[in-house]
Amino acid sequence: SQTIHQWPATLVQPVGSPLSLECTVEGTSNPNLYWYRQAAGRGLQLLFYSVGIGQISSEVPQNLSASRPQDRQFILSSKKLLLSDSGFYLCAWALQGGSEQYFGPGTRLTVT
Amino acid sequence: AQSVTQLDSQVPVFEEAPVELRCNYSSSVSVYLFWYVQYPNQGLQLLLKYLSGSTLVKGINGFEAEFNKSQTSFHLRKPSVHISDTAEYFCAVRSLPFDYKLSFGAGTTVTVRA
């Protein structure tokens, strides 16, 4: 069966510091991968998605970037964090041609 | 582009009472529809989905939803809730045929009280 991992689970970082969040999927090949952000009391905002290695689509211009160095690895990065980057970051995957997305456990990021 | 509106941001309900969460969507093309549940500090879990066929869809944990194309709605129901159903619920839509993305509503927080 397929599983999705995210780490770290929680992170506290000062303003201006770099960020790297990692997501990996097991048990499937060539999945579509997604990064979402959930701010407190708000819905899910799609940040990036990828349909293959090296293929990244950005939904919202911002302080973040994403990379997909391997088929089942998706990384969310920032060179300098802002206070507004605080939130709950969720990674998700979907089968190519599939209908639904499957979510990871999330990373709680607090920028201080 | 599609959009999703969840009509209630918070729904308080007593244990063993029924609950309905309302979801309306807009799209110029055919859609897939989903309901997800999120427990505190966890990821989202798929409750149920509508792809085609019967408009009444049954999901996990006793939930069901009805797709109404003319009213562009996909309301979620449960006849008798438990304390453990306290969570946030998200409606989502995916436009067909080639959209890889889901659009989510703002969420409905359900609080079940004894």
Image (tube, coloured by chain):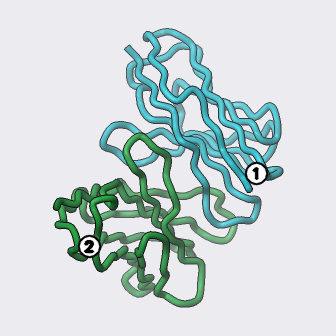
Residue at 80%, 45% in the rendered image: A52
- In this rendering, the answer to whether A2 lies above or below B30 is above
Circle 1 packing at 10 Å, graded few (<14), some (14-19), many (20+), is: many
Please tell me which residue lies in front, A75 or B15.
B15
Q: Which residue is mark 1?
A: A31
In space, the residues marked 1 and 2 are separated at their CA atoms by: 35 Å
Tag in front: 1 or 2: 2
- Residue at the image position 46 percent from the left and 86 percent from the top: B56
Question: Which is more toward the observer, B25 or A76?
Answer: A76
Apparent side of residue B9 relative to residue A105 in the rendered image (left or right): left
**Badge 1 amino acid:** Pro
Q: Which residue corresponds to mark 2?
A: B19
SS state under label 2: strand
Q: How many marks?
A: 2
Residue A86's place in the image compared with B17, above or below, is: above
Q: Secondary structure at mark 1?
A: loop
Looking at this rendering, what residue extends furthest in the bottom direction? B54
Percent position (x, y) of residue A63?
53, 24
Residue A93: image location, x then y, percent: 66, 50
Of all chains in the rendering, the one displayed in cyan is A
Relative horizontal placement of residue A14, taking residue B114 as reference (left or right): right
Query: Which residue is found at the position 44% from the left and 62% from the top?
Result: B3
Q: Chain of mark 1?
A: A
Q: Residues within 10 Å of mark 2 (few under 14, many from 20)?
A: many
* Residue A59 at x, y percent in the picture: 57, 42
Q: Residue at x 41, y 74 (%)?
A: B63
Q: Where does the C terminus of chain A fall, quadrant-wise?
A: top left
Chain letter, green in picture: B
Q: Is residue B94 left or right of residue A66?
A: left
